[in-house]
């Protein structure tokens, strides 16, 4: 288990585990991903995220 907060999208409970203790659904990270100005491939990653919607 890691020290990053996670949230269940189904019922809104916060936890540190990868599965919700109440409904057993997968949890998602609460914190945004780290940003680095030296990221060479950030532009392409953002484009792929827009294309997959």
Image: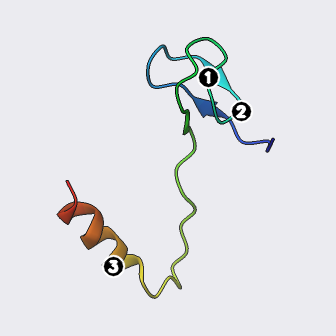
> Disc 2, disc 1: CB below 8 Å?
yes
Q: Local crowd at mark 2 within 10 Å, few (<14), some, or many (≥20)?
A: some
Q: Where is residue 2? Give x, y as percent.
A: 79, 44
**2 or 18, which lies in front?**
18
The x and y percentages for residue 32 are 52, 50
Residue at point 29% right, 63% down? 49
The residue carrying mark 1 is: 20
Q: Secondary structure at mark 3?
A: helix
Using the numbered discs, state the Cα–Cα distance from disc 2 to disc 1 in whole angstroms: 7 Å
Query: Where does residue 45 sit, x and y in percent of width and height?
Result: 36, 73
Vertical placement of residue 35 versus 14, above or below:
below
Real-space Cα distance between discs 2 and 3?
31 Å
Label 1 crowd (10 A; few <14 / some 14-19 / many >=20): many
Q: Secondary structure at mark 1?
A: loop
| Comes first in the chain, label 2 or label 3 | 2
Label 2 residue SS: loop
Q: Residue at x 73, y 32 (%)?
A: 16
Can you tell which mark lies on residue 43? 3
**Tag 3: Cα neighbours inside 10 Å, few (<14), some, or many (≥20)?**
few
Q: CA distance from mark 3 to mark 1?
A: 33 Å
């Amino acid at each position: 288990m890691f020290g990053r907060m996670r949230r269940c999208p189904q019922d809104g409970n916060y936890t540190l585990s990868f599965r919700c203790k109440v409904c057993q659904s997968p949890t998602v990270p609460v914190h945004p991903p780290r940003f680095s100005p030296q990221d060479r491939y950030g532009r392409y990653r953002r484009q792929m995220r827009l294309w997959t919607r």
